[in-house]
Amino acid sequence: MLRMVKRSGFKGTVYAVNPKYPSVEDFRCYPSLAALPERVDHVVLAVSNARLEAALDEALAHGARAATIFASGYLENDRDPPLIQRIATKAKAAGMAICGGNCMGFYNDADGFWAAAFPSDRPPRPGHITFITHSGSIFGAIAHHDPRFRFNLCVSSGQEVATTVADYMDYALDLDSTRVIGLFIEAVRDPARFAAALGKAAKRGVPVVALKVGRTEEAARMTLSHSGALSGDDAAHDALFRRYGVARVDTVDELAATMLFFAQGRRCARGGLGAIFDSGGECEMVTDLAAEMDVPFARINDDTRAKLAQRLDYGLEARNPLDAWGTGQDFSGIFRDCTKALLDDPDTGIMVQFADIRTGFYVHEGYLEAHTAVVGETAKPLAVATNYTQLQHDGIVERFDAIGVPVIDGTANALTAVRNMMAHRDFLARGEAVPEPAPDGARVRWAARLGQPRPLGEAEGLALFTDYGIPTISFRIADSPASAETAAMKLGFPVALKTARPDVLHKTDVGGVRLRLSDTAEVREAYAGLSARLGPRVLVARMVEGGVEVMLGMKVDPQFGPVVVIGAGGVLVEALACVTHELAPFDATTARRAIERLKPLKRLLAGVRGSPASDVDGLSALIARFSVMCADLAPLVAEIDANPVIAGPHGAIVVDAAVVPRAAAGI
């Protein structure tokens, strides 16, 4: 630890406390904190679990404001409450910040101080990346292996007994040097502060890149046993990240690539990807992969094509993506001028040269010269990406880094980073979403009913939806063959007949629905069958034909509140498995973006095989109002479903509604 403090270049005073030795690494040792000549700010507790509580008590008595704890905090045959909880309680009561326990410490490169549990040859090179991770191994992988990563702060936060990811983020967002925040997280221990930190980052335009693990049931179980914290519902995390423009990634390589691209400080401009290659085959490969990953290429104009044609060797096509390698004559100048031409095109938002560079090769030295000439003449992001990740290129990578051009290893990693850059650009361009207010008095009118420990019947659910301004199907309740026939005639044929038993939420599962009844005889026959099995009370509704079935649902996440699920509905739910999630409430524009993400549903709504296009604006408005209702009723309800919602050419309408109060769910 003392050797690492020396390497960090820390300018403050460091005291070694160890009663066994007179000195360690030329630092005088003191027998205790009480023996120090002055009060210290930060105590690094490098002691065993058996001595941890006493050491923390000594630090608190000394008046230290912060501590780093490497130990796990677990004791065999411990008492109740266990050691880790006792430490957390004491630290929080004293207002002490703690890195850990069970962590690897941190590198504060902005201030030049390292609290490090293990030795490393990493150089003290301050930069613009804040990286916070629950995993010590990921901390070591990112911080210790690659000189491309320059941090202002790199933290192994461990168990977060007193100080959480949200606290580190809040601190980093007040640093002028922070250009991007990277997260590797298992669980969110302070949901409100975490959401607030994401909101602060969004407001300040600082991108956040997150790798959230624990998405599957098995991974979540491992997270619980490993860190003692619930990992939470992944759909809720997805919705949270989407609301605040967080770039979610799946692998450490994608996390690293995206952080590197954002760290250069240039923001993606309007338009698509400009790409230049020295290989026709690799150009085709990247073109295919970009299409699969929804990364658009810039649509260059005729002036740009003319500039490219003027510089390219005979036989090469002036296009984007561009294979620019010809005879090899003046290749550096050709790549310089073609890169500049692509960058200058008004539809190029970001530029990447794909090349498998290696140190000491004259061709790649020529590419470095080309980028050196171009990088200062543009404000657009510019990078080099390799298509193979196992290259001998450390030396030339550092030289590219020195001119402000990151080198990203791996085709998919680079395209993921490009997509994330574009997504953050689009997020910042949206402006603030302003949902509609909930109707005055609606929650008050329904509070008593929603306080009862039984689900709402469909009729009640539809009435509730109507009270929140959500279009619903016309219906009547009947309890006899005659009243069912009368209801059908007043509504107009064709009609649907459903059981109205309030305890039956999924009517189709019990054969409780008859559709497209075209006359009174069919109504009588359907009523006889339903009433004999499920009781006399039925709901008669006018059939809605000629639309696309959409499903809406809501459940209240214990960490982040009401989450709305949007997807293909009716029989398409299982067939398409096409859903997305948003935190409630939200506006119609957000709802429309959600629909755009659901490509199979989007195609159906656009009209297929001669069917008319659905009113997507009307559907978006309905979904937004549904989200407002969900947010307003979240203190009272556990689940709400609208399935199906029929989206047709002239609007959207809720056909079936199910509402489960919290009291009915045993909450």
Image: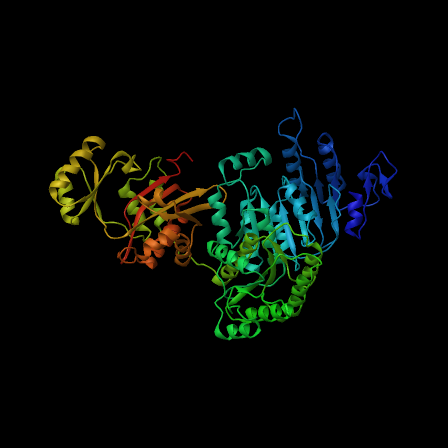
329 to 632, vertically: above or below: below
Q: Quadrant of the C terminus?
A: top left
Q: Where is residue 241 in the image (x, y as percent from the top left)?
A: 51, 50
**Frontmost residue, 463 versus 204:** 204
Task: Name, please, the residue furthest toward the top.
Answer: 77
At 49% from the left edge and 69% from the top edge, which residue is drawn? Answer: 300
Task: Using residue 404 as the reference point, say whether residue 445 is left or right of it.
Answer: left
Decide if residue 146 is on the left or right side of residue 223. Answer: right
* Residue nearest the viewer, comparing 610 with 525: 610
Residue 307's quadrant in the figure? bottom right
Residue 588 image-quadrant placement: bottom left
Above or below 50: residue 634 = below
Q: Can residue 660 be seen in this view?
A: yes
Image spot of residue 641 (x, y percent): 35, 44
The picture places residue 205, in percent across and down from the top left corner, at 56, 60
Q: Is residue 308 above or below residue 134?
A: below
Tell me the quarter of the image containing the N terminus. top right
Q: In which quarter of the image is residue 262?
A: bottom right
Q: Position of residue 646 (x, y in %)?
A: 29, 51
